[in-house]
Amino acid sequence: MKNANIFISAFFLVLFGAFLSSRAQLPTANYDENRVPEYILPALPTTLKEWENSRSGLIAQFENEVYGRVAEGSFRTEVTITRQRNGVLAGKADLKEIRVQIITSRGELPIDILLLTPLGSTGPMPVILGLNFYGNHSIHRDTAISLSDRWMRRNEDYGIENNKATEASRGVRAYRWAIDKILSRGYALATFYYGDVDPDFHDGFSNGVHPLFYQEGQIAPRPDEWGSVSAWAWGTRRVLDYLQTDPQIHEGKIALFGHSRLGKTALWAGAQDKRFAAVIANNSGCGGAALSRRKFGETVQIINTSFPHWFCTNFKKYNERESQLPVDQHQLIALIAPRPVYITSASEDLWADPKGEFLAAREAGRVYSLYNSTSNPLLEKIPPSHTPVLGPISYHMRSGKHDVTDYDWDRFLDFLDLHFK
Ligand code: GTR
């Protein structure tokens, strides 16, 4: 009996210890400006020639140390128009659904695109390509949109049962997509579910696009090979491949939009692929627009611990060692230059470090100035809420929480009008 008691106590002690150490892995986030460490950012070149010569080396550093490079290997794609309906969305839009099937010697993976265009318009017109979190059907309730049958994160409020969307999942994220505004201002909207490319949970990279590119005997990406963010960015570029061939779309006016983890994805895709004519990264935070060295809110260690699959294994070397990172996120934004980029923050979204997002944009402005010394109005000081600064690098702070609101969309469309019209 006594032995049993000792055994039970020891068992609970071990359990409690495990609980404590799992907690200990996640340091509490700092929200105090006074406790932001002093840091020196990796310098940006001061001449255009130097910058252009350093660009590919910089991309390689982001590949090797942060996001992971796309695994080598050939692939082909097969494109099928799977559905076409005119007069959807209460008669305001035409719909086209396109499947891009990725094919390698190891398997196949479908990416399903939803393309909405203003009713009756033939184009070619500018398009906003935005990644979505819960399936194409989540952005509007119209049943003309196909319901995704892919794995989806649990969310009872969104009608997701056994990790699958149901009819109740239609339109659950409509509030984040100002489709009427987008269409009425003359833009098309293209979207796809990021989970088509890689389901967002850590399964050791046995699902999604990664295994399609494994070498003989390989079971996981190498330390410098792609994590999920890099995979989502790659998938986004495959959707871009398609959009450039669509006669309704102006191939030189394809803007990329992403929120939060998908804002990180949008920046990385935009940095690598000059065919994206503009990039909008909303509340993208750590691993997105925010400077890693500030360690404000979510840090490299926190993000690598909560989401071990997002970045490449090498990125974990910089847990609590941000100053050793060969790059910081201002350089990621600079890689988009001279194409217009819009970085946005929300005043209560401290987890994403609004100030760090602004400072990175401001620093990247130095590279934009190399292309055009008069065109960059970005302020020295962080502007107050609801005071957008629009230019090649645009920035706004919205008041409120981590989210995408109509206020943001109105500004995004102003930004695109400025550059595309
Ligand atoms: C959070 C994560 C952020 C951000 C966000 C999101 O949990 O810590 O970096 O990516 O998720 O994507 O909604």
Image (cartoon, helix red, strand yellow):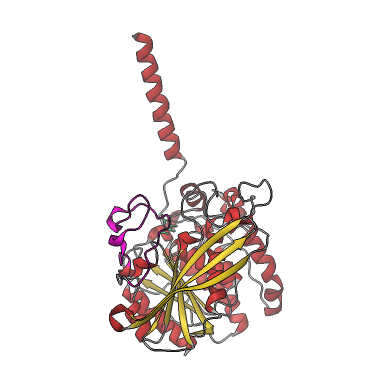
Which span is picked out in magenta?
144-173
406 shown above or below 414: above
267 or 375: nearer the viewer: 267
74 shown above or below 319: below
Residue 316 lies in the magenta-colored region: no
373 or 319: nearer the viewer: 319
Q: Residue at x 36, y 71 (%)?
A: 145
Quarter of the image that includes the N terminus: top left
**Which quadrant of the figure shows ligand 1?**
bottom left
111 or 174: nearer the viewer: 111
Position of residue 110 measured from the top left corner of the image (x, y, whole percent):
51, 63
Tell me if 15 is positioned left or right of 212 in this view.
Answer: left
Tell me if 318 is positioned left or right of 144 in this view.
Answer: right
| Residue 285 seen in the current view | no
| Residue 239 seen in the current view | yes
Q: Residue at x 68, y 59 (%)?
A: 72
